Amino acid sequence: KLFAIFAFATCGGYSGGLRLSVDCVNKTESNLSIDVAFAYPFRLHQVTFEVPTCEGKERQKVALIGDSSSSAEFFVTVAVFAFLYSLAATVVYIFFQNKYRENNRGPLIDFIVTVVFSFLWLVGSSAWAKGLSDVKVATDPKEVLLLMSACKQPSNKCTAVHSPVMSSLNTSVVFGFLNFILWAGNIWFVFKETGWHSSGQRYLSDPMEKHSSSFNQGGYNQDSYGSSSGYSQQASLGPSSDEFGQQPSGPASFTNQI
């Protein structure tokens, strides 16, 4: 939640500016302090300012180039909704834990939303990183000076007095990718709460149980087979010994008869 707050606060609350100086040959036509202010959502083509032309009292109306509002607004929107969902999920985890686990519906919804927000953080942070790069180029004082007709004349002196500070915008991009890492890493922990994870474990354990049971059955059959074969061998030997014991009875009876 904190990283989401930092992400949309550093981007959505930004306002900055630059200052230029145009020193004409005729000092009365010069303007040594030209302030150009811009802010979120960075519709730079709507930012206009007037500069001297160094040709009398005529003034030139200049506008910055570019429009990064789509990427900036998308990034801030993702951050705001991610913060709201995190806040709601925290309340559910604390006060409605039983309903959350009921019918496994809560964990499944949480898993799907976490995957979606991970994807949105990746897309939003990448888009805003590209948009910020365009903002830096469009607000570079050296690039802005090229838009002025007075600065195209070598006799006039145009300089950049103050450049915009972009540290907070750089921080917003960093927090955007940090949020992506956190949400993507949380996918596994949310997945473990779903029924998919437990059913997968049961699917893996069932074949192992079947294999072990079949192995035990095979050992039992071998033992029973061994015992039965031993019994049959003993049985076969029994009658032969009896027959062997009955053989002398023949000659003995013959002798008695003699």
Image (tube, rainbow, N blue to C red):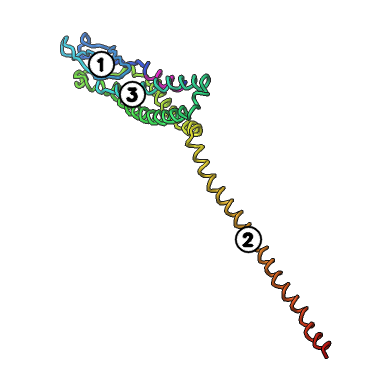
Q: CA distance from mark 2 to mark 3?
A: 71 Å
The x and y percentages for residue 51 are: 22, 14
- SS class, disc 2: helix
Please report whichever mark, 3 or 1, sits nearer to the chain's N-terminal start.
1
Whether residue 129 is situated above or below residue 253 in the rendered picture: above
The reply, left or right, for residue 227 in relation to residue 17 is: right
Please report whichever mark, 2 or 3, sits nearer to the chain's N-terminal start.
3
Task: Please tell me which residue is depicted at 63% across the width and 57% down the height of the picture.
Answer: 220
Crowding at mark 1 (Cα within 10 Å: few <14, some 14-19, many 20+) = some
- SS class, disc 3: helix
Q: Which residue is mark 3?
A: 74
Task: Please tell me which residue is depicted at 36% across the width and 27% down the height of the picture.
Answer: 124
Along the line of sight, the residue nearer the viewer: 6 or 184? 184
Q: Tell whether label 2 touches label 1 (CB within 8 Å).
A: no
* Residue range highlighted in magenta: 3-11
Q: Which residue is mark 2?
A: 222
Q: Which residue is mark 1?
A: 47
The x and y percentages for residue 162 are: 34, 17
Q: Which mark is residue 24?
A: none
Q: Give the amino acid type for the residue marked by disc 2 in the picture.
A: Gln
The x and y percentages for residue 251 are: 79, 86
Along the line of sight, the residue nearer the viewer: 168 or 72? 72
Report the magenta stretch's main SS. Answer: helix
